[in-house]
Image (cartoon, grey):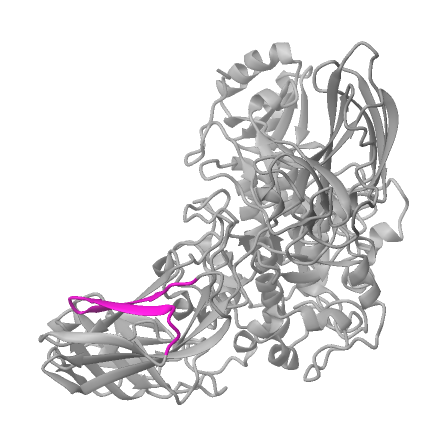
Amino acid sequence: MSIFHNRLEGFSRKALLIFAGLGINILAFGDAPPGDMQIVFENRKSADSIMALYPDIKFERVIPLASNREIEARHRDSGIDLWYIVRTSSRKMTRSANMFANCRGVRGVFETQLITMPESHPVSDTGFKQQASHRSLVARSASVMNDPLYRRQWHYSMINMEKAWELEQGKRNVTVAVMDGWIDHSHPDLAPNMWVNEAERNGQPGVDDDGNGYVDDIYGYNTSADLDYYSPHGTHVAGTVAAVNNNGIGVCGVAGGNGVDTGVRIMSVGIQNTGQKIPEWLMARGFVYAADNGAVISQNSWEGSYTHQSPVLNEAISYFMENAGKHPDSPMKGGLVLFAAGNDNSNTPHFPINGQSFNRNRFITVGAVSSDKIRSSYSNYGWWVDVAAPGGEQNGVSIMSTALEGGYMLMNGTSMACPHVSGVAALIVSKFGSAGLTPEFVKNRILSTATPIEGYQAGYTHATETSLGIVNAYAALCDENKEVPGIPEDFCIKTYDKSYALFSWAMPSDSNGNAPSVCKIYTGKEDVPFAVVKTSGAEAGARYEYFDQSGYASDYSEFTIEAVDCDGNRSGRSAASAVADCTNDLAVINPYNIDNFVVYKPSEYDFAEPFDDVALTFFVNSDGPKTVEIENSNDFIRCSLFRNECEVTFDLTDETPTGTFPFTIKAYENSDPDNAVRLHLTCTVKNALSGNKGVVSTTGGSTLAVVETNKRRGEISMDLTKYLTHPWGTNFAIPDNSRTIKDDFFGFEVNYSIVNGILDAKYNFDNAITFCSASIKLDAVDEYMIESSFDVEVKFIDNGTGIEDAVSDKATNNSGIYTTQGVKLDCEVEDLLPGMYIINGKKVLINR
């Protein structure tokens, strides 16, 4: 066991940090460089004294010494300058750790954790680049934007962006630090909005011209030594934040403006490095860099483990929150940090979201919703998720944004949701920016104006834990006002079965014509609300209902209601309204406050949510025997009654038609069938959520094709792209590579290369053997950044079939599956028995 000590409370001594969304892992100490650990001193005097005592040990500051006195003074005031990396030989590591841990003046000694990022592969985005090059492909006609791919950015209409752009398009003095992979700053849709360090761009190469502690940091700070590496993930995130709008190419960004006199700046802070291992303190360095160089918003689409805390990283995030904006003409004092909630379909907060040392009022966690405003099947959820934004779903309805080499691509994830909110935050700072603007104001604006989505989650997994709002850009940007909203009118309360209450009122509006942010319901003259109902995004003037299932409403005789807008203005309370006891009244109560329910046909993929059969519960209120039934409906909608609860079930199959279908729940007392009540609803049936079915493969395996030969030496040439299928009609990209592999048992060689999806292989099997095989292992990546792995198996069989070329067109060129005699088979590839078949005109040996 390693001997490391920690005098800081609230942090674990060992760590495994998993960046699940991006495939990044922080490894245990055994993977760290020999002789590398972190020390934090109590004060500057202790640091100088202890380092002077050990001149043979190399100490390196986590945050480089800045010759700029103002920056260095901030480091010292915050104590971030007291963190050091200590490097000794591995032989001396344990002794050094013990020695420093027992020194007075040392606050803590920590293991250095390492982050590793797997290799990225190019994405096939040629089609998107071609589309983006033609100005004739315009966006939807109602839009003011001429960016050709804007028509595919459905996610902006969900957050009310077009109306928001009429109010604000972004100021040039607002900078968002994208803490991600290194951004392709040359991308034509990003270059005009990139933050540029002019002192370094116009200075001398290899010199820290501005004195901030970093050399040649022109577009930001990159932990990578290879400054030519660009990240598809980071580039995609940056495009959502601030791709240039209305420039006739590509896509739009939330805060992109025109890239000349409007639009915010994007600072690239590279905290990932493909194929290399990075110490966590380099990530900490990124947060401090962003604060020191003018960023006021930190965009983070990465996640950590559920238990680990990194002291140095936590202190760096806190540094950003407290020290961002401490530069001339800053639009905000202090920094706002936004994190993606993660893609684990879990309600457990992870690092650094679960950090207790942060100012939570300057921290926003973002979950993802689909195009139907339903929680995305992968998105984390729970009380700790502050707000939602479009992240796409794994059915092809994805987020379009910028890609490498001037291209564009679709991706899904909370990683895609988070930059929507970061962009809206940047617009809020742009509109309301001043010396007195605080991150707390920006967070409150985002949360208080978010459009409620509870009703859309009806019948879906964890519906009660998805009480989020979707960020509403327009509402968040409406002018701050001091006028109070109207008092809700026609307020009434009905209780049913002594357990449930239905509150109803006419929705007032504020001076901007918007519904209030919340309506607070009080009992009698109490000052603490009985219920706080999120109402932003509702239609002002319309009837609004809130269904309470607490069971406490019947304990009170009257209630009052008050409206509060996003600026905190309060309407004052309504007149008291008496509670009407409707226990014996026959009624069907819909607790979801929506009248259309979206359901999906069955899916073969485990991740698919909502589930195939979605059950909705309504309440039928009457003491006597009663009956419920479905009227004017297709036969896939059924209902049943248990006590006073009516359960509606959507029993879907592959044959269920898609579309929107009206149906009515009818309830009546058995003693008086003519006295019936009805609830009119609709149901929208959509095709199954689909995942990446990947390649044509054998069941339970990943064999793309089998090439069987009776020649001991030979060559193979295959167009691999003809073998790949994708459920969303897109293409796979197969990275170019070349290797020498050996057969699975005897070790004889197969030399192969892949260029532009064409596999060329040469094999050489020994004369003494009668059977051997070798598997060429390949990877493919689609436009949605989903990777599939598969094998091409080369088999030599003495006196075999003589089939040498699995891709020669024989027997038929028709699509489908045929026997070698040309008989068409009505089945799926996964259902085939072992043997030789012709699939889409190509010979394939299925071998299980």
Q: Quadrant of residue 65?
A: top right
Residue 571 location in percent, x, y?
34, 84
Q: Quadrant of residue 356?
A: top left
The answer to whether 554 appears left or right of 163 in the picture is left
Residue 278 location in percent, x, y?
67, 33
Q: Main secondary structure of the magenta part?
A: strand
Q: Residue 595 or 540: which is nearer the viewer? A: 595
Does 320 appear above or below 563? above
Residue 808 location in percent, x, y?
84, 42
Does 43 appear above or below 208? above
Does 587 appear above or below 192? below
Q: Is residue 649 visible?
A: yes
Q: Is residue 328 visible?
A: no
Is residue 651 within the magenta segment? yes
Does 171 appear above or below 631? above
Residue 717 location in percent, x, y?
86, 37
Q: Residue 593 or 848: which is nearer the viewer? A: 848
The answer to whether 59 appears left or right of 543 in the picture is right
Q: Quadrant of the C terminus?
A: top right
How many circles with numbers are drawn on the protein? Answer: 0
x 73%, y 47%: residue: 822
The magenta-colored residue range is 633-652
Is residue 37 within the magenta segment? no
Q: Residue 171 or 329: which is nearer the viewer? A: 171
Q: Residue 279 or 615: which is nearer the viewer? A: 615
